Amino acid sequence: MSTGPRPLDARTRLLVLTGAGVSAESGLATFRGAGGLWEGHPVEAVASPDGFRRDPALVWRFYSMRRAAAAGAEPNAGHRALATLEARLGERFLLVTQNVDGLHARAGSRRLEELHGSLWRTRCSRCELAPFADDRHPVQPPLPECPRCGGLLRPDIVWFGEALDDAVLARVGGFLRTAARAGDRFVFLAVGTSGVVWPAAGYVHAAREVGAETWLANLEAPENDEAFDHRFIGPATRVLPELLEAMRD
Ligand code: BJW
Ligand code: ZN
């Protein structure tokens, strides 16, 4: 019979990676599996620089719908459990999310890195204009243009083939190195992510290499399943509160 892992405690260092599954129970669609298409378009067609060049109005329609859906959604018990874990662990905790919906911040998470950008910022597709807060929707033709260079504005989202923000990657790398050096118990926990998209899918390997226990909380086995030491199969709104409940001082 297999036993579960030792519960988290106040001295554990915890790096959490979340994906679309953590927001599924807030009513936001995931990317793959059923519902993996948007109006018949594969995600890559509306979430890539090529897709934006081909049809910027279509891409803005997609992100307008995403803004509307996220604005109408509420953080769930999974988001809240992660915010509570942060409050307990302080600097021993980091939440890295692939989600762009803003629900972790709305649930109270502050030690938070958004790997794939945010639905709630816009930037220029041509120049280095600083990304700015923007919750307009729908965005439809005539599409908004950059006040500096006249290029088309675009959502501040990391699309396929685009580099992730160096500063974000450096902060996540710094947390991994500090945790590795500290010699405390170190747990890496992936929640609601299919493990398909890189470099996020590689964090479990990086954590394992520096001695972390690797835990998974997901509805099903992800693509990188073999890298996990422990699996909690079930919905995030049940599993995350249970992990918190089991935590010891
Ligand atoms: C539940 C649940 C519940 C449901 N409870 N669980 C190495 C190998 C192969 C390819 C590459 C590689 N390195 C890079 C690449 C290319 C590419 C890539 O990974 N391609 C793969 C598809 C093969 N990566 C990139 O292009 C990245 N950029 C890059 O590497 O740049 C390099 C570079 C360097 C220097 C210069 C230039 C370039 C960028 C990736 C950006 C990803 N962006 C997207 C879309 C934009 C965001 C948006 O519009 O929202 O981000 S793709 C999409 O996938 C989105 C997500 O954040 C991301 C991950 O998806 P996620 O979160 O895992 O969701 P799902 O739907 O896949 O899974 C949900 C899971 O939850 C499922 O398992 C369910 O079972 C589960 N679940 N309900 C618990 N209630
Ligand atoms: Zn510009």
Image: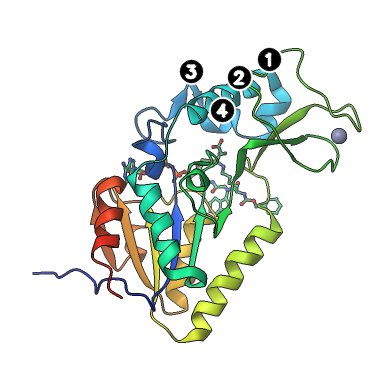
Image location of residue 90, percent across then percent down: 49, 69
Q: Residues within 10 Å of mark 4 (few under 14, many from 20)?
A: many
Is residue 164 at least partly visible in the picture?
Answer: yes
Would you say the residues marked 1 and 2 are in contact, meaning their CB atoms lie under 8 Å apart? yes
Q: Mark 1 or mark 2, which has the lower sequence index?
A: 2
Instruction: Indicate which disc residue 140 carries.
Output: 1
Image location of residue 239, percent across then percent down: 26, 53
Instruction: Indicate which disc residue 122 carries.
Output: none
Q: In what element is the residue under mark 4?
A: helix
Disc 2 residue type? Answer: Arg
Instruction: Indicate which disc residue 67 carries.
Output: 4
Disc 3 residue type? Answer: Glu
- Say which of 196 and 207 sits in front: 207
- Compared to residue 85, the image places residue 33 above or below, namely above
Q: In what element is the residue under mark 2?
A: helix
Q: Mark 4 or mark 1, which has the lower sequence index?
A: 4
Disc 4 residue type? Answer: Arg
Instruction: Indicate which disc residue 39 carries.
Output: 3
Is residue 223 at least partly visible in the picture?
Answer: no
Image location of residue 17, percent across then percent down: 45, 57
Q: Nearer the viewer, mark 4 or mark 1?
A: 4
Q: Residues within 10 Å of mark 3 (few under 14, many from 20)?
A: few
Would you say the residues marked 4 and 1 are in contact, meaning their CB atoms lie under 8 Å apart? no
The residue identified by callout 2 is 61
**Gap in Å between the C-alphas at discs 3 and 1?**
17 Å
Would you say the residues marked 2 and 3 are in contact, meaning their CB atoms lie under 8 Å apart? no
